[in-house]
């Protein structure tokens, strides 16, 4: 083999290793977050407190008017090996482990690990707009 070919192979190997490291790092971070959450959450915390401390949940379920379930990924891509190795976040169709937080009347009442299949997103999944508030604006300025 020539030196140029060796350099190309080395570059590809490094790229592959770095992409695998991204997936493994993402997986480790979701596990660490869930573990920290399980020890830090307190019954009675408000939706706002949890959101400020832990960010947007990966899934939300609304059960009636007063009950919500927020799910934070622990291992979101357990049925998708390439997604586990390469960085991908939660996507429709994935099976995985989540930490479910149950709220009643806006207060945290319990949390536990659960398995979910991520549902398909509502709508097209992509929006583009120009104008106030985003979305499509029917106001034209000349």
Image: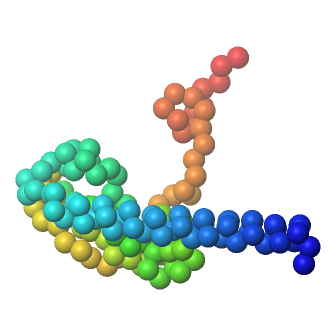
Residue 136 percent coordinates (x, y): 58, 38
Image quarter where the N terminus lies is: bottom right
Is residue 72 shown left or right of residue 48? right
The answer to which of 36 and 49 lies nearer the viewer is 36
In the rendered image, is residue 12 in sight? yes
Question: Residue 115 occupies which quadrant of the picture?
Answer: bottom left
Query: Which residue appears at 36% of the width and 64% of the height?
Result: 30
The coloring applied to the image is rainbow
In the displayed structure, would residue 42 be above or below residue 25? Answer: above
Query: Which residue appears at 60% of the width and 26% of the height?
Result: 139
Question: Residue 68 occupies which quadrant of the picture?
Answer: bottom left
The answer to which of 12 and 62 lies nearer the viewer is 12
In the displayed structure, would residue 136 be above or below residue 44? Answer: above
Query: Which residue appears at 32% of the width and 50% of the height?
Result: 55
Image quarter where the C terminus lies is: top right
In the rendered image, is residue 105 in sight? no
Toward the top, the furthest residue is 142
Residue 83 percent coordinates (x, y): 54, 73
Toward the right, the furthest residue is 2
Is residue 93 shown left or right of residue 107? right
Question: Residue 67 occupies which quadrant of the picture?
Answer: bottom left
Query: Which residue appears at 59% of the width and 38% of the height?
Result: 129
Figure label count: 0
Is residue 73 shown left or right of residue 139? left
Residue 97 percent coordinates (x, y): 33, 75
């Amino acid at each position: 083999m020539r030196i140029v070919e060796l350099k190309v192979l080395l570059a590809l190997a490094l790229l592959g290793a770095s992409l695998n490291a991204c997936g493994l790092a993402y997986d480790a971070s979701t596990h660490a977050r869930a573990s920290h959450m399980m020890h830090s959450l307190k019954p009675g915390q408000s939706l706002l407190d949890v959101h400020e401390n832990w960010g947007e949940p990966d899934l939300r379920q609304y059960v009636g008017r007063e009950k919500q379930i927020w799910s934070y990924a622990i291992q979101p891509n357990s049925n998708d090996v390439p997604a586990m190795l390469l960085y991908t976040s939660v996507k429709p169709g994935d099976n995985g482990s989540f930490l479910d937080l149950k709220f009643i009347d806006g207060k945290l009442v319990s949390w536990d690990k659960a398995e979910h299949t991520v549902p398909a997103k509502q709508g097209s999944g992509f929006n583009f707009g120009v104008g106030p508030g985003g979305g499509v604006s029917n106001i034209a300025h000349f």
